[in-house]
Image (cartoon, rainbow, N blue to C red):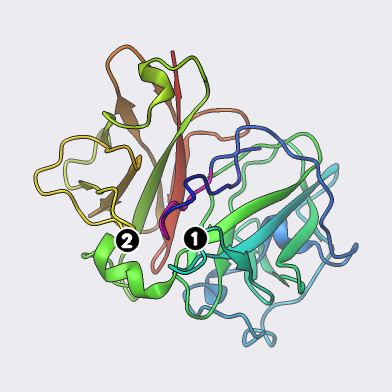
Amino acid sequence: MALAACAAPAAVACVVVACSSSSTSAGASGPDAAADATGAGDDAAADGGATGDAADELVVSSSCGSPPYVTLGIVAVGLTVDNPDGAPLPGAKFTSPLCPSVVHYADDAGVIEGLVSANTPFYGRLASQGYISELVPEELVDADSTGHRIPMIPSFIEGVMFPGFDAGGSAAILVSMTTTTGDGGACSAVDGVTITVPGHPEATVTYFSTDTIPAPVPDGGATTTRGLAAVEGLAPGQLVTLAATKAGCQVLFQYDTQTGRTPLETGYVSLMPAYLTP
């Protein structure tokens, strides 16, 4: 499963999602801790609702979509400068357009686990007070998979990494490079990757430094060894397909369970891993 991991021990924005192996570790909160893998509607979005403030409209459920189901589970993790590895985020809210009326909240260990329709495209939303609201990539899953860490970015970094982002009216994408080979060659390094959005000349791409809190690289044309890039300027309410190139390598957005499409919603930063392979 492609849902989430944080690689680099050094920085708050080592953020993102890219666990190419499907961990089937435990970490659930019981059958009705479920709806996660696909939670709720747009009203559960940028409110950062970790306290059940949408309870009048949303219900906690143990399943989402129609059977047959698979079990999916994540661990919501809040990153800080002092603790770049992150700590569990109890109460983090998970919703999905696959289940417009369903919500689930992380338990004390940050765990959210539930049932979702097998082989059905879905993506999820994750929100917690003090953190940027996030979307995970669109996926198609056909087997149980749990224990995936979703790192959440603290709100204070929003203006640094996403200067054009407006939680009330725009969307952004954070791309994180992930290597799939350990041969020590070019495709084992996350720098030198150039990202585009085919069919969207309005999109702007920013690459980031290796500072503890990543800073935009002026006139940067490719990723640094931090392997991060932000995409802004795209209208919310659509799914887009990114493209990326690096000499001598393939850079894949469609990989494992990921469909390759990135959802965009108002007030959310979409986490999107890219996979480097020879």
- The amino acid at mark 1 is Pro
- Do tag 1 and tag 2 residues touch (Cβ < 8 Å)? no
- Give the structural element (helix, strand or loop) at label 2: loop
Which residue is denoted by mark 2 in the rendering?
213
In this rendering, would 123 be left or right of 163? right
In this rendering, would 135 be left or right of 111? left
For the question of whether residue 264 can be seen, the reply is no
Q: Earlier in the sequence, mark 1 or mark 2?
A: 1
Spatial distance from mark 1 to mark 2, Cα to Cα?
Answer: 10 Å
Residue at position x 34%, y 76% in the image: 168
The magenta segment: 11-17
Q: Is residue 95 above or below residue 119?
A: below
In the rendered image, residue 215, in percent from the top left (x then y), is placed at 23, 57
Q: Quadrant of residue 243?
A: top left
Which residue is denoted by mark 1 in the rendering?
84
In this rendering, would 14 be left or right of 123? left
- The amino acid at mark 2 is Ile
In the rendered image, residue 221, in percent from the top left (x then y), is placed at 16, 36
Q: Is residue 143 above or below residue 231?
A: above
Relative to the observer, which residue lies in front, 246 or 13?
Answer: 13
Residue at position x 54%, y 52% in the image: 136
Q: Is the magenta region chiefly helix, strand or loop?
A: loop
Quadrant holding the N terminus: top right
Residue at position x 17%, y 41% in the image: 201
In this rendering, would 201 be left or right of 136? left
Residue at position x 22%, y 34% in the image: 222
